[in-house]
Image (tube, helix red, strand yellow):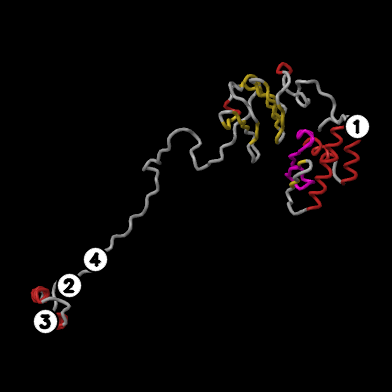
């Protein structure tokens, strides 16, 4: 559990009683607001509707988006926590350069140009260095010739980070690691693509399922012979077609020879 000063514990007791929340829920929200430098919070608290976001003087989002009473509760609670964090020593003082300290980065880096936090990941930008704290572990990167303008985290729950520079948007994982474990790369989400870089090859024909061959269609046998009555009837029909101009005399004669050969 997060360590608190006596004053911090008194604040948690008071807020827990007035908002009818557990101590753990209030502490969770206090840590979230603190990670957002008192101006914002990203949290996942079951007693407050699960995942949500809060921004001072701006947007409040909760899992139950149409529950306006819950939104008001989160907004009021976070505002009170922000004021308490600004005026009271809520957390014990942690020496600089250690996890949990406001100055959590290695002391030899000096004073950062900018700092920020998102989804419990903190970062600080220095000349030619970028420090990232993830789950209490600090990694220092060499920023090479990048002029970093901002750091952002991929939405969706993973810990992938990117930053903007004069070269556009660049992944933090592309930078050389000076010290620390590094930030894990984003998980594979394109499950349609092969998991490795090896080219895809079709299964061997020996293991591919065989498709049953369609049954052969036997042609309907055509009788080679006809009797004389059938031949006469056909010739009469052809004669009428010839007289009507449907078939020519040449076509009539050809069909007549064919019928006579089959008698």
Give the Cα distance between marks 4 and 1.
Answer: 97 Å
Q: Which SS class for mark 4?
A: loop
Mark 3 or mark 2: name the one nearer the start of the chain: 2
Q: Please give the range of residues in magenta.
A: 33-54
Residue located at (79% from left, 38% from top): 28
Please, is residue 108 above or below residue 220 in the view?
A: above
Give residue 31's quadrant in the image. Answer: top right
Q: Which SS class for mark 3?
A: helix
In front of the other: 201 or 76: 76
Q: Which SS class for mark 1?
A: helix
Asked if the residue at tag 1 contacts the one at tag 4, i.e. Cβ–Cβ closer than 8 Å, the answer is no
Q: Badge 3 is on which residue?
A: 228
Q: Badge 2 is on which residue?
A: 223
Q: Badge 1 is on which residue?
A: 7
Please, is residue 27 above or below residue 146 in the view?
A: below
Give the Cα distance between marks 1 and 3.
Answer: 120 Å
Mark 2 or mark 1: name the one nearer the start of the chain: 1
On whether residue 50 falls in the magenta region, the answer is yes
Which label number is shown at residue 219?
A: 4
């Amino acid at each position: 559990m997060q360590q608190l000063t006596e004053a911090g514990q008194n604040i948690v007791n008071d807020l827990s009683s007035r908002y009818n929340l557990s101590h753990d829920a209030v502490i969770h929200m206090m840590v979230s607001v603190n990670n957002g430098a008192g101006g914002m919070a990203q949290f996942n608290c079951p007693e407050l509707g699960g995942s949500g976001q809060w921004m001072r003087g701006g947007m409040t989002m909760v899992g139950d988006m149409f529950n306006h009473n819950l939104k008001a509760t989160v907004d009021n609670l976070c505002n009170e926590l922000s004021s308490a964090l600004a005026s009271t020593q809520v957390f014990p003082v942690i020496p600089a350069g250690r996890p949990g300290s406001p100055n959590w980065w290695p002391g030899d880096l000096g004073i950062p140009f900018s700092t920020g936090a998102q989804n419990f990941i903190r970062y600080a930008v220095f000349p030619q260095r970028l420090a990232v704290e993830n789950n209490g572990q600090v990694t220092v990167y060499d920023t090479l010739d990048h002029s970093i303008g901002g750091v952002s985290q991929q939405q969706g729950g993973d810990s992938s980070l990117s930053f903007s520079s004069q070269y556009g948007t660049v992944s933090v994982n592309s930078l050389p690691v000076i010290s620390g474990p590094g930030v894990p790369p984003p998980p594979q989400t394109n499950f349609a693509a092969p998991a490795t870089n090896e080219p895809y090859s079709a299964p061997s024909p020996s293991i591919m399922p065989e498709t049953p061959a369609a049954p052969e269609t036997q042609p309907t046998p055509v009788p080679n012979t006809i009797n004389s009555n059938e031949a006469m009837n056909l010739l009469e029909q052809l004669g009428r077609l010839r007289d009507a101009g449907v078939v020519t005399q040449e076509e009539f004669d050809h069909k007549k020879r064919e019928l006579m050969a089959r008698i």
